[in-house]
Amino acid sequence: MEPVMGDITRELREGEEWWIVADQAVELMSFETLWRAHEWRRTTPMYAHYEAETGVRYYMKEDEEWYFRTADSRGWRKAENQKWVEGKVREWEEKYLKHMKTLGFM
């Protein structure tokens, strides 16, 4: 599991301006205003998990629930195993903190 920030780009769709939050050309969410795109990206924890069999899955936490989507699907679905996702996120956080301590930042 790795954290994802997402890039924000502007796109015209049917003559209207949309702001797209994407990671490696995978659209994670779209918004009508740049402010909403930044706010969503800033406040929504997002992670990517890679597996050889299934490819990449994106996870986001909203209202204390984890949702996922694959790179080739549209829309978010509630994660089947919430505890597994929480465990993977905690595992990444522990590795990150250990690495920061090793570098002397903590």
Image (spheres, rainbow, N blue to C red):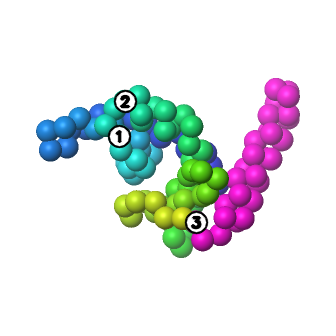
Secondary structure type for disc 3: loop
Q: Is residue 98 left or right of residue 46?
A: right
Amino acid, disc 2: Leu
Amino acid, disc 1: Phe
Rounded to the nearest whole Å, what is the CA distance between mark 1 and mark 2?
Answer: 7 Å
Asked whether the residues under the numbered discs 2 and 3 touch, taking CB atoms below 8 Å apart as contact, a structural biologist would say no
Rounded to the nearest whole Å, what is the CA distance between mark 2 and mark 3?
Answer: 28 Å
Q: Is residue 105 placed above or below 54 in the rendered structure?
A: above
Residue 47 in view: no
Q: Nearer the viewer, residue 23 or 20?
A: 20
Rounded to the nearest whole Å, what is the CA distance between mark 3 and mark 1?
Answer: 23 Å
Q: Is residue 17 magenta?
A: no
Secondary structure type for disc 1: strand
Residue 98, horizontal then vertical, whole percent: 83, 41
Residue 13 in view: yes
First of labels 2, 3 by sequence position: 2
Q: Is residue 97 placed above or below 65 in the rendered structure?
A: above
Q: Nearer the viewer, residue 25 or 59?
A: 59
Residue 59, horizontal then vertical, whole percent: 56, 55
**Mark number for residue 31?**
1
The residue at the point 58 percent across, 66 percent down is 79
Q: What residue is shown with label 3?
A: 79
Residue 42, horizontal then vertical, whole percent: 54, 34
Q: Residues within 10 Å of mark 2 (few under 14, many from 20)?
A: some
Asked whether the residues under the numbered discs 1 and 2 touch, taking CB atoms below 8 Å apart as contact, a structural biologist would say yes
Q: Residues within 10 Å of mark 1 (few under 14, many from 20)?
A: some
First of labels 3, 1 by sequence position: 1
Secondary structure type for disc 2: helix
Secondary structure, magenta segment, majority class: helix
Residue extent of the magenta highlight: 79-106
